[in-house]
Amino acid sequence: MVSAVPFVVLVLAMTAAVPLGTSILVQSAAMPDGSWPTSQGDVYFAAPYTVKSGEVFDGKMKTYQRSNVKCRGATESAWQNAVFVVENGGTLKNAIIGADQMEGVHCEGGCNIINVWWDAVCEDALSIKGGSESSVTTVIGGGARLAADKVVQHNGYGSLIIEGFYVESYGTFYRSCSDCGNKGVKVIIRNLFAVNGRVRLLTQNDGDEITVEGIKIKGKKVEVCSVGTGALRISCKYSLSTVTYV
């Protein structure tokens, strides 16, 4: 959770395809079709499973859950309640995070999240913390649904790339930390299929840059960009040609 302080609200903030810095790794993933994967079985952890730096954990499309932690609504929590903790340089792929989990995946610095799905998100699906200005976290494919609060909470430094992601029935899609200081994060979101949500991006930090392109929206037609009080230097350029309503 984050403090209730003034923020800038970017709702479907479409930025033109301009480079945000050489630290961002270009990825490519197609627009999702709205389908949800079939679980290949259940796995329970008594403690967070740590994916070490340099390790690739292939979940083989099984559903991963904590045996001793349950959702308590939008109550603030920490990494100790996560299903996975992915260290800087680690990769988690082909996994489903089960429903009723207090925390989903915690990324420490720059990590890779590939084809990971969150079912019935409790507080946050993915939390990104730590790292440095050169850290790059990539989220390729996957999806999340039934997230009353946030899908992605970005409290760390560096850049974030989200490609080919499906999100359904949720509150806020992305939020950077509102009381962590001005970290100037750089975010690229491409090929996002959003169903029954606000597709809202919240940020308060001076110097934050957000690029969103290739968005398909099913449900309520939302405002493109709404700027409130708070940060002064936020990239909020957009092109309506990148938004499709279905």
Image (cartoon, rainbow, N blue to C red):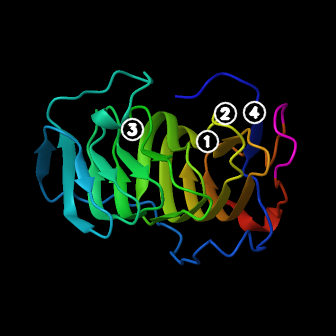
Badges 1 and 2: C-beta atoms under 8 Å apart? yes
Which comes before the other along the chain, label 1 or label 4? 4
Q: What residue lies at 75% left-to-right and 57% top-to-bottom?
A: 209
Secondary element at image label 4: loop
Q: What residue lies at 44% left-to-right and 24% top-to-bottom?
A: 76
In this view of the protein, can residue 124 be seen by the observer?
Answer: yes
The CA span between labels 4 and 2 is 7 Å
Task: Look at mark 3 in the image and give the residue it sits on.
Answer: 121
Check residue 131 for magenta coloring. no
- Left or right for 1, reference 7: left
- Amino acid type shown at disc 2: Ser
Task: Look at mark 1 in the image and give the residue it sits on.
Answer: 175
Which of the labelled discs sits on residue 7, or is there none?
A: 4
Q: Would you identify the image quadrant in which residue 24 lies?
A: bottom right
Which comes before the other along the chain, label 3 or label 2? 3
Q: Nearer the viewer, residue 180 or 126?
A: 180
